[in-house]
Image (cartoon, rainbow, N blue to C red):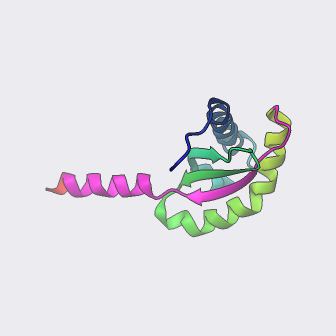
Amino acid sequence: MVEQPSYRVERINELIRRELVMLLRQETKDPRLQVVRITDVLASRDLSSAKVFYTVPEEQKDMVVALLKKASGFFRSRLSKTLDLRHTPELKFIYDSAPNTGARIDDLLAKL
């Protein structure tokens, strides 16, 4: 049985997502990270960790995986300064293939 996240965890998920989007746009110096789109954030119930789902163009996937892994400490430290949480969750970036799959299906349907 999958447990529904609490209202507080849902709010924190959205706060983390918004802050990460802002950090990627304004404070990331590496232009290769400008193509990253945060699709969702799922924090654990105890807020010790958070899965950050993102999407990028397929050809840049491998490069961005390494960059996000390297920059996760930067993002976590920035989040700790802006969010009013006792503990800032550890961030785990996970590639979200659903948007790319949807676009591919749309292209196939358009060709019919």
Residue 27 drawn above or below residue 68: above
Percent position of residue 59, x then y? 49, 66
Task: Please identify the residue farthest to the left as the structure is shown.
Answer: 112
- Image quadrant assignment for residue 80: top right
- The residue nearer to you, when weighing 45 against 60, is 45
Percent position of residue 99, x then y? 42, 51
Residue drawn at 86 percent across, 38 percent down:
86
Residue drawn at 59 percent across, 59 percent down:
94
Residue drawn at 52 percent across, 56 percent down:
56
Residue 105 drawn above or below residue 26: below
- The residue nearer to you, when weighing 97 against 64, is 97
- The residue nearer to you, when weighing 57 against 4, is 4
- Image quadrant assignment for residue 43: top right
Percent position of residue 104, x then y? 32, 58
Task: Please identify the residue farthest to the front as the structure is shown.
Answer: 1
Q: How many marks?
A: 0
Left or right? Give the position of 70 relative to 7.
Answer: right
Residue 28 drawn above or below residue 18: below
Percent position of residue 35, x then y? 57, 52
Residue drawn at 76 percent across, 63 percent down:
70
Is residue 66 found inside the magenta-colored segment of the image?
no
Image quarter in which the C terminus is found = bottom left
Q: Which residues are magenta?
A: 84-109
